[in-house]
Image (spheres, grey):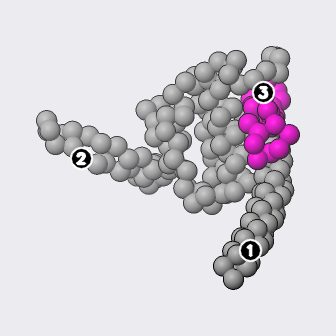
Amino acid sequence: DRLQTMKVERSDLTQAIARLRDGIDELNAEGRERLVAAFDVINDNFKALFEALFDGGQAELKLVESDDPLEAGLEIYACPPGKRLSVMSLMSGGEQALTAAALIFAVFLANPAPVCVLDEVDAPLDDANVDRFCRMLNEMRNRTDTRFIVITHNPVTMSRMDRLYGVTMPERGVSQLVSVDLKQAEQIVA
């Protein structure tokens, strides 16, 4: 009786393991489909945004190191106008920052979130590239419902924002939060 009970339990366990493996295979298949679909959308967005940010050039994302999308790595290939296509790590700091911004914005176009915090993204950029970044940020704000919070010390970027928040120290050891609505400030000045 005991042997028979153990055989039944073993059979039940074997069937449960088979069902779990089938479930895992189904989830992996669906995950692959979703990943490839999302990757294609993000890659198309990335290409378009990169070209807009750099006024030309080309860029693309590639899954590398594995044929299985769930195990593959991601490589970013890009070339601003006048340069050869290469991996992102071979670009200058400013080019890398703009390329990364294009990728972040491409993801937000595919799957918008309510809030995006960009911390010192414009730090490695010169004034011309800051202007490009700000134009792209404004376009993203118009194309999505995302609220962008930009942490920056760059006066060009600050001048293009709707509202500024800052911390001042009117007295030693006493910090004070200051908020300025730039559109309202312009109306007051006018």
Q: Which residues are magenta?
A: 54-80
Cα separation, mark 3 vs mark 2, equals 43 Å
Residue at the extreme left of the image, as rendered: 172
User: Would residue 75 be counted in the magenta stretch?
Assistant: yes
- Read off the residue under disc 1: 7
Report x, y in % for residue 11: 77, 73
Where residue 77 sits, quadrant-wise, is top right
Determine which of the numbered discs, if any, sits on residue 176 in the image: 2
In the image, what residue type sits under mark 3? Ala
Q: Earlier in the sequence, mark 3 or mark 2?
A: 3
Determine which of the numbered discs, if any, sits on residue 78 in the image: 3
In the image, what residue type sits under mark 2? Gln
Secondary structure of the residue carrying tag 3 is strand
Q: Nearest the camera: 112 or 56? A: 112
Up-down relation of residue 33 to residue 9 (above or below):
above
> What residue is at 67 percent from the left and 45 percent from the top?
105
